[in-house]
Image (cartoon, rainbow, N blue to C red):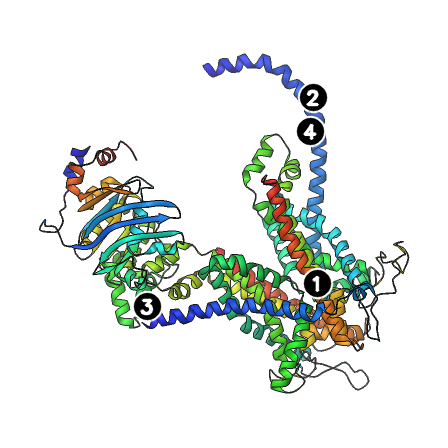
Amino acid sequence: MMIQLDTNIANFTNDKGEETPVQIEVKDVNIFYGSNHAVKDVNMPIHEKSITALIGPSGCGKSTFIRTINRMNDLIPIARCEGNILYRDNNILNPKIDVVQLRKEIGMVFQQPNPFPKSISENIQLPLKFAGMRNKKILKETTENCLKEVGLWDEVKDRLDHSATGLSGGQQQRLCIARALALKPSVILLDEPTSALDPVSTSKIEELLLRLKKDYTIVIVTHNMQQAARIADYTAFFYQGELVEFGLTRNLFTHPEKKSTADYISGRFG
Amino acid sequence: MSSKVTNRIALSLIVLCAIIMAGILAALLGYILVNGVTSISWHFLTSESDPFLAGGGIKDQLWNSFYVLIITMILTVPIGTSGGIYLAEYAKPGKLTSFIRSCVEVLASLPSIVVGMFGMLIFVNYFQFRFSVLSGALALTVFNLPVIVRVTEDGFHSLSSHQKEGGLALGLTHWHTIKTILLPAAFPSILTGIILSAGRVFGESAALLFTAGMSTPNLNFTNWNPASPTSPLNMFRSAETLSVHIWAVNTSGIIPDIQTVANGSAAVLVICVLLFNLLARGLGKVINNKLSGKS
Amino acid sequence: MKIDKAVIAQTPESSPKSSLLREKGLMKGFIDHYSETRGKTIIYSSALLMIIAVVAITLFLTVQGLRSFFVDHINFWSFITGTKWSLDQTNGASYGAFPFIFGSLSVTLLAAVFATPVAVGCALFMAEIAKKWGQRVLQPIIEILVGIPSVVYGLIGLSVIVPFMRVHFGGSGFNLLAGSLVVGIMILPTVASIAADSLRAVPDSLREASFAIGGTKWQTIWRVVIPAAGSSIVTAIILGMSRAFGEALAVQMVIGNTFQMPHSIFAPAATLTTVITGSMGDTTTGSVSNDVLWSLGLILLVISYIFILIIRMLAKRRNA
């Protein structure tokens, strides 16, 4: 199993195969859901312009953790975070931070495609309008660019004013990614973006992510190890709320240091 | 920056709206109770209203309100719950069902004065019931029926389908399942709805104006023979209810203490409605606790 | 093969038992059948009764309301558009109902204008900002307000709003504005609770999506949640308007009840419902003065049906 996977790992950290600088530094992060200690003492770097995958069995805290990076957990009243997530000399977890600005720089795509029940172009223009953009020309251009970036332009250019809810699941998810790109964020978080999609749509999204990592830092939660192996430069393995192992994907999959990592990636549990 | 300011302003406005709503209730209840409670006395509750002089009470009106309410409930509850059961359990999707649903919707949305006019036309004039307790109760039945139907249907819909399947699997017929399993299970929510609707019926005025009338004959509270014209139980006498009384003294009353009588009556009315509300909540909770075994 | 054997093995054993059961079942079946039929009869007849009620109301009010046009030969058009109303038979009666139609519609619209912002704001508070508080404090408040009888609202209008108008805007204090305010306050809780329900029905994933692209709370509410709840909120408002339109006594107590066309919102006016409640007792059945009141009732019924149709159309569009 491990050896098989090895041949699939085609990509490297960047085009030259070098490690990119660290963009987000996670230090001693603990997350509580009420009295439940959901994430324990996590320390890890997130490298710029690379794909970092978070894997692990369900309930291991990976989704909770990724939602903390742009403070989406604020929406859950019982969730509480401790520790530091350093991003551009700021601690993301600082209560005083401007979460709206933060989310403009760190975008997010969810498990279920969640386009707004509005037109396709409106979906992409909404984040810009939120940010105060009123210039029609720029709005139009951005719509086109973002849709082209996710490879959706040719499929929808004739029906930009149609409702986004009429698109297929895969198209909706690419639209959601395009929507996240509209604000030119530096980081995009994806929480199991392909788990609700069919294999063809999934591979389209994977190709898209590989293209996007030239310009964006990508963090993706996936329950699909093969997906992590196919696209991620770095992989973090979570188990029962703890970060068990973090490393370059090729190392983690070929020479896991911890036994539970080896068990998981060889399919012995989870 | 500007979006942040907008956010702050908009959110404050929303909070303001909530405060206004809470303030309206406080002001309304405060006004009614503060002004009204002082005029409530044992004498006020137990003496007859006086058409010309000050110092009249609301005994007859209070009795009439409860009497009309009870007759209305006796008429509406069986019909309304069976209608609700029909819609929840028997109605097959189709033209007839959607027509019945439209009828319920229409009945629920018609202005109560329209219902009152209909009652006047049919019960008062055509059936010759005159302005009477019965005409009033029948008009209120038309007015309250859709509410009970909806309450029952919602109560049935909120049950899990397992309970019904369980009953059918035991070899019970559909009707038996409804009677022995579903109806008892839906009972708490239906009861709550019925009590709340009773509060609405109790305060209704426009539908009663042309059906129960704006006057009450001299009632003799020692005469309980329903056939006697002075008996409080007589269904074929006119009956001014409390809410109609409030309206009547304010718009056409000539007594010198209109304010006192109106405020006192309103306070009694509101207290009764509040009691219905509390009762509905309390009973619902008690029965639910009993069913779930929390003593 | 195994199954066959099992069936064969069971058959001789179970057949006497099953015949026994059937005998018992016959009685039980008979009772069940009887009770089932009786239950169904009750249930079907109550459904039938509701149909009869609606048909009867519509039919009788229509027949009675058309009398003034077909029996008394009043011109329908001049009835609708005329502005002079006088039931005084000796000095030449005139039946122009336009001031009342206008009064009803303006009270309805003004009430909606007063109630909508506060009601929707209150709904937003309950559904978006403080869910716990909304559930625990505001929801019961609203339920109590819905239950307060309309005459009580009228009485408050009479003893608070009317004197206030008299002091600040002059005149008697009984005017169109007072009527609209009373009804506006009366429909507030209804609109708020239905609007809150429709906001709660908006899936959280849309809110998440909006926050994730840097929307502020207000931007999320304004650009995403309200449009998504859209037609349900409109339905709430229209339901409120239909209640305002049909309200009789509360309005009658404060609006002033003149038969003239109001020239401003500070002028006394009348609505369809107030004229009916005010004059019905003074006219005798079968007279022209009485017939025209039923015609007003018919107009009331028709406009109520229009409200119902609008609400149904909105619901249909939502489900489509």
Pointer 4 indicates a residue of which chain?
A: C
Q: Residue at x 14, y 46 (%)?
A: A11
Q: Earlier in the sequence, mark 4 or mark 2?
A: 2
Numbered mark located on residue C29 in the image: 4
Residue C119, how many percent across, how many down?
Answer: 53, 67
* Circle nearer the viewer, 3 or 1: 1
Q: Disc number at residue B203?
A: 1
- Could you tell me how far apart the alpha carbons at marks 4 and 2 are, in whole angstroms? 10 Å
Q: Is residue C147 above or below residue A18?
A: below
Q: Quadrant of residue A1?
A: top left
Question: Circle 4 sits in a helix, a strand or a loop, which is it?
Answer: helix
The residue sitting at 70% across, 78% down in the picture is C75
Q: Which mark is residue C193?
A: none
Q: Secondary structure at mark 2?
A: helix
Do the residues marked 1 and 2 share a common chain?
A: no
Do pointers 4 and 2 mark residues of a single chain? yes
> Do badges 3 and 1 share one subunit?
no
Q: Is residue C232 left or right of residue A183?
A: right
Q: Circle 4: is it few (<14), some (14-19), or many (20+) Cα within 10 Å?
A: some
Q: From where the camera sits, is residue B239 visible? A: no
How far is the residue under mark 1 from the one under mark 4? 47 Å
